[in-house]
Image (tube, rainbow, N blue to C red):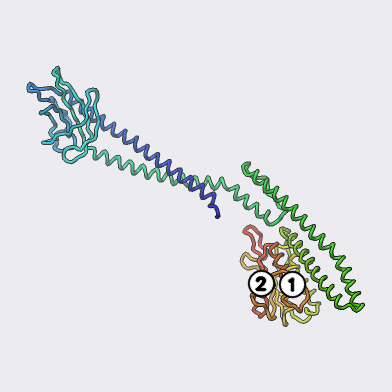
Amino acid sequence: MRQSSLRLRLLIGAAVAIFLAMALAWGGISWLFHQHVERREAAELTKLAEQVAAGLTLGADGRPVVEPPPADPRFHAIASGNYWQASVAGASAQSQSLWDQSLPAAPASVDAWTRSTVNGPFGKQLTMVSRLIQPDTRPVRVVVRVASDDAEMRTALREFDRELALSLALLWLVLSIATYVQVSLGLRPLDRLRRDLDPLRRSPTARLSDEHPGEILPLTEAINAMASARESDLARARRRAADLAHSLKTPLAVVSAQSRRAREAGAADAADGIDRAVEAVGAALEAELARSRAAAARGAGGDAPALAVVEGLVAVIERTDRGEAVVFAVDVDPALRIPVDATDLAEMLGALIENGARHARRLVEIGGGREERDLVLHVADDGAGMDQSAIERAMQRGVRIDEAGGGHGLGLAIVRDLAEATEARFHLGRSPLGGLAAELRWSLAEDDPAKLG
């Protein structure tokens, strides 16, 4: 299964990590701010409660009295949300704002003011501070409570949480964009390495440069070492194939001479058998030499003038018996140059033009030009053509489509091998003239100079 993009994994990982960090920051900042605001609110209530405690006394009947009461006007308006109360068992003194209500019980300490959140009168939630105070020498402790409606505070805290979340979300987006830029810059050497690998794929002699960051240099050195080993293996294999093919040519020539002598001596059947064997071995040799040429063409490069190559081939084929019987119509743009060695281009076009001349009734058309970012050469004839199954068999080395013709069925397969070696697309189909149409198409890379015009 294909692995996901490294860039995508890094970006997703960073985005998730930043999101978690922002979420933790939101929770921590919100908690700290809530605590700070609630402490400030409790401190304000404590100041008011101390004013109540400062005026607290016990009457002769043991009832608590606060004189003077806190002067804050909020304690005088009924249900204002601000209340105080001093109470003992069965009696209490309280602010006018409580009216006929009372503050709920809550834990209270002798040593310090205790903060709590309670459900108070008039259906409001209150923040309240409480403390047990002994006003005089009598062993009576009065519970002093001061409370305030915290709805406004809670609303402000919720707004703060929402604005903080929006701010951190914006920060997450900014940091994610910064991470994308950072990851892109960090992976740029890998993009360059990918571009440097393209010539290495095209040519066994190409190597990666050492102008890469130190972290990537071990990888480039390993790739270069592998490329050197591959180049050596290819060169050794080509030499062996070529040496084998050439070493067998002389023995085959000797065997052919013996066949002629046998035929002259009257042993025609034996001579025919020898000729068939020599022909089969010759086909194998030609195939190996074609493979060697295709391997040598891979990465060789070039800048062949298409029209000059075509005209040279036509001039030769016109002198053959079959070439004299057909008309060659050449329509190749004079400015068209193919990124292939001229010898390899002549090898491919020669096989196609010769095949067209062999099967044409009267006309062979040869054209070439540029189509957008493609360089195109095509050869078409007005012969009988081939169906799809015949085309598929013609692309296979050693298959004879025309048993009456000469050769070993190698031409189209050799064109295919050379096309693959030079990164061309080779296509066979039906010609508008009625016969076979062969097309070679090379795609220009984005940074290639224009080969036409």
- Position of residue 321 measured from the top left corner of the image (x, y, whole percent): 80, 79
Image coordinates for residue 350, horizontal then vertical, percent = 75, 71
Q: Quadrant of the N terminus?
A: bottom right
Residue 352 quadrant:
bottom right
Residue 280 position (above or below residue 120) = below
| Residue 337 visible in rendering | no
Name the residue type under label 1. Gly
Label 2 – label 1 distance at C-alpha: 12 Å
Q: Is residue 344 visible?
A: yes
Q: Nearer the viewer, residue 252 or 54?
A: 252
Residue at the image point whose x is 15% and y is 23% from the top? 56
Question: Could you tell whether 313 is left or right of 264 in the image?
Answer: left
- Give the residue number, with chain letter if any, for mark 2: 392
Q: Is residue 78 above or below residue 275?
A: above
Sequence-first tag of 2 and 1: 2
**The C terminus - image quarter:** bottom right
Instruction: Indicate left or right for 204 with 11 as reference.
Output: right
* Residue 142, above or below 411: above
- Label 1, on which residue? 409
